[in-house]
Amino acid sequence: MKWGKWDRRRVLSAVLGLFSFSALTAGLRVRRASAEWLRPPGALPPGDFEAACIRCFRCAEVCPPQCIRFDAWLPPAEADTPFVVPADRACTLCMACTEVCPTGALGRIERQPDLIALVVKMGHPELSKDRCLAWNGKGNCHLCHDVCPYRNQAVTLSGDRPRPEFHPSLCVGCGLCEEACPVDDQAIRIRPLSEKTKAPS
């Protein structure tokens, strides 16, 4: 069977159209999600960070939990800059990324827990009590407390049946609590610093 010139063009147009639609929808998905992205520890303020980052990917290469991600579907100023989605994989606060950044986009931070607690602020915690098993009475869960590197400080347990209470001023925003939350739509979210803390529900 021989294909004519117009048949080939129609097939090619269909393939390119499908690719373009997939790319567009992927881009929209990423842009919607970007509002909830966290930068790795030690990141400069927004604007300064994007200007200083040279997209060398070294931070991701040395990241033990492989939580640092990149995406090219952002506006040029932000494209392929590092971010963390803690619901998928959280930061373990090893500070390896800050040790290899060649431009200071991620400021170097020594691997000292007390120092990390003072200088690292990736985001702030937001707990939805209506989804939290310990708060809504549907379970007895305190995984967020158990995995927190600053348990009994950033997150404490209170009440006869232990329920988590978060203390944003003492939270570094690593997201280990969000990653550990067993609820499908996590009850705890680490929000970017640009977002205001909402009242617990």
Image (cartoon, helix red, strand yellow):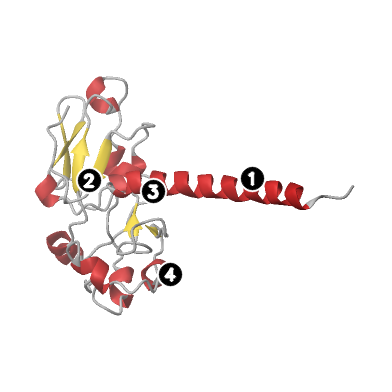
Residue placed under numbered mark 3 in the picture: 30
Q: Which residue reaches farthest left?
A: 169
Marks 3/2: CA distance? 16 Å
Q: Earlier in the sequence, mark 4 or mark 3?
A: 3
Q: Hey, what amino acid is under mark 1?
A: Ala
Secondary element under disc 3, as helix, strand or loop, is: helix
Q: Residue at x 31, y 38 (%)?
A: 143
Secondary element under disc 4, as helix, strand or loop, is: helix
How many numbered discs? 4
Q: Residues within 10 Å of mark 4 (few under 14, many from 20)?
A: few
Residue placed under numbered mark 1 in the picture: 14
Residue placed under numbered mark 2 in the picture: 191
Among the 4 quarters of the image, the one containing residue 65 = bottom left
Q: Residue at x 42, y 49 (%)?
A: 27
Residue placed under numbered mark 4 in the picture: 61
Q: Residue at x 16, y 47 (%)?
A: 154
